Image (cartoon, rainbow, N blue to C red):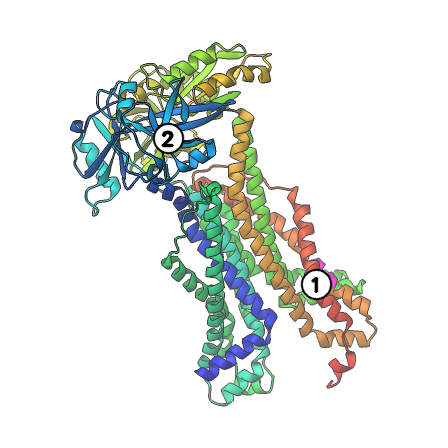
Amino acid sequence: MGVFLRYISKNMLERKGRLFLLIFSIAISTALLVLSLGMIDAFMDSFTQPAKIAAEGQEISIHSNTAETFFSPEDINMAGIENLTGELRLTGVINENDEVRYVTLAGRKSFDLKMTEGVFDTADAGNVVVSDRIAKEYGLEVGGTLTVAIGGEKTGLKITGIASNDGLFYADQTKQFSAVVPYEYMNSLLDAGGKYNYVTAKNADDSIKLKDAVEKFNESNDKVKASVLIDESTEGTESITMGLYGMLGLVCIVCVIIICGAFKLIITERLPVIGTFMSQGATRKKVEHILLAEAALYAAVGSVFGVLFGELGLAFLTRMLAPLKDYGIYPPLNINPVHIAIAVAFALLLSVGSAWLPARSIRKLHVKDVILDRTEQTHKKGTVRFIAGCALLAFSIAGAFIDAEWAKNLSALLFLCAFLGLAMMSRKFIKLIAGKLSNLFRGNTTLFLAMNNIKSSKLLRGNITLLVISLASVLAIVSVGASMKTMVVDAYGEMNADFSVFSIIPSGSGKSATDTMIEKLSAVEGIDSSSITVEYDAMSQVNDYSFRIIASDPVKYQEYMLYFDFENNKDYQTYTNDTDRGVMVSSTVLRNIGKKPGDSIEIDIGGKKANFNIIGEYDGKVYYSGRTLLMKPDDLMNIYNVKEADSVYFRLEKGAVPETVEASFKKIIAELGSIYYSRDELMQMNVDSNQMIIDILSIFSYLALMITAIGILNNISISFQQRRKEFAVMTSVGMNKSKRKNLVLTESMTGVIWSIAAAVPFTLMVNAIMAKLFQFVELPMDIEFAWSSVPVFGLVTAAVVFIATLSTMKKSKKLNVVAELKYE
């Protein structure tokens, strides 16, 4: 066995270009798999890890479930929980130059975090402890004053201590941080009567899932409700995950073509050695195993680099997403051994599986023919592959353009079949076309020879296939990005509001902060007071399916949300006039929870449940991924005790100067601790958010193009080496250096032209499939082909292929006719 390993290792190292190509292809595919497996976990860890530390070991938060904000420990049935910790919490505001910063004031009876300076002094009610990070950023020190606006009124708190950034203070940032004050101060300020408005606890039984423990607690309590303190759900990431694996599939198809082609060449080069092995008693199966062992060695080396690159990519991503990166704080990289095992197995399967196809041809070799170099290649498999590829492509085309439920449900399979079908049928199809075109160009020697060479060379035809696949993937991603931007711009154009206000902070007094906001905005000259629309939001689940509840005045919401086209929805008019717990549910939600108009639906918000009547449905489109339900504000506030709005929208009066009106309300909103955005700002934020996803997916397609470029470089070089005698013969009858160089260049550029011509219609079909794929993941979106990107990426492709051809063009100039034909 050791002899065979040394033989295999020696052969691998003989062709360093091929060694690099195969290891690089396997490594990139493996790295992308590691990234795909770990990206969502890395994203979640970046945000949950600081939250877990700030939670100080607690897992459950408890709030009042009645109209009364405050509650006492005696109101709590401890079913399924333990380790109660109570506080009085209130959000204060620091407003400097209309820049809003939020301070979570936690009223505690004791404070046991490590102090870097001073103490937590409860003797004087107006004392406060801040973190070391915030003290340095704000220039605060013990004995100084922290001025915070509470309910619109500024209050000075004396700093008696500065604590280390741990526990509650771990996640402190410049614009949002925590501060601890004596419980008695908050009790007096809020008139809480010795009660709490925020309690945390732990799950009493680790064998029970946290979600089940919360549900058990809520079933045993009426006055309070519990919720999971840190949401670690990955729901809503399905579209990203599917996109990652889809692009990984494209990269894998490119790699399979390259690996398969490389092993075909390896077998051709080693036929004399294989014949020698057979003459010494080696069986065909043994020779096949040697080739597969070589593929496994490529996989082993490639997987090492792939796992390394993948983990480095995850580390970089984790650092980029870290919410505290500005302070040099990054969550630890969690290396998942299961993911590594999957990646190594994937690399072995990719390499050995790709090599197995050409290795099977060993079974048909005869020892005598191999030794005498009389092997003949048959092309029966090419015909079978061509027919199978056409069938897969026909299936994909049918699914792309047939409006049926099965096509949407099988969209991921259609996507894969489209690229597999293209890869399987393209070589023979190109051969047929090249044969026809070569007859047309008989009058032009260079073009005739180029077409004839493409017809006869599998490597050159393989180059075109690789280019079509990689170029189509790039064009598809660009089309998705452009379509997403168009969709967002169009959607915001149908949201009839000039400005939107968010982060409405509870006042802590008897009057609602939302009411105060409406009163003050209504008094601003230039704001159309009749357009002010208040929206209350909440989250709920039915059958583990999450959706957003939007509660707003039906008449005003219809004027604002033109995007939903309520004007042409008769059910919405019925809902507007309803007074008996009626709701409107989006088609997406109804489909996933198995309900229909006329049914009853039980809505659970924060552990409190109530039944509602489904009056009708509407097309939620892509707003919150279509996961929305409309409810009357009074129902949400009275039944579920929601006290403050999530957002307020308003328009300006006709003729009003936006800059002047904005200057008038800017200070009002800042003083109340809220933030606002114009419609254009919200639109751009959404576009930028979507662009990040597109950029991540683009990395995959660009890597496919990079692997293709390296594969083309290798294939062009090998193709020239295989045809050196042919070039020598043509040189002997008059072909000079310039014509040889032009022939090589013409072959490559013809491949570019063909790949662009094929990639455009193929991408149109892929876009139709991707539109169904987006519908399947509840993001209905029409994907328009990005025609403007064709010349850009066409030139990029031409440049890549030209650079890959330069080396071979240089070699063609140095061809020695005598050396090549001395044995002829």
**Cβ atoms at labels 2 and 1 below 8 Å apart:** no
Residue holding disc 1: 805
In this view, 567 is above or below 585: above
Q: Is residue 469 visible?
A: no
Does 574 sit left or right of 217 as displayed?
Answer: right
User: In terms of depth relative to the viewer, which is nearer, 783 or 553?
Assistant: 553
Q: Position of residue 605 (x, y in %)?
A: 29, 29
* Residue type beneath disc 2: Arg
Does 124 sit left or right of 777 as displayed?
Answer: left
Q: Residue at x 33, y 42 (%)?
A: 52
Query: Which image quadrant is residue 802 in?
Result: bottom right
Does 420 sit left or right of 210 as displayed?
Answer: right
Total marks placed: 2
Query: Which image quadrant is residue 438 in?
Result: bottom right
Q: Position of residue 777 (x, y in %)?
A: 43, 41
Q: Main secondary structure of the magenta part?
A: helix
Quadrant, the C terminus: bottom right
User: In terms of depth relative to the viewer, which is nearer, 465 or 183?
Assistant: 183
* Residue type beneath disc 1: Thr
Q: Is residue 725 magenta?
A: no
The residue range painted magenta reads 745-750
SS of the residue at dot 2? strand
Q: Residues within 10 Å of mark 2 (few under 14, many from 20)?
A: some
Q: Is residue 747 magenta?
A: yes
SS of the residue at dot 1? helix
Residue holding disc 2: 548
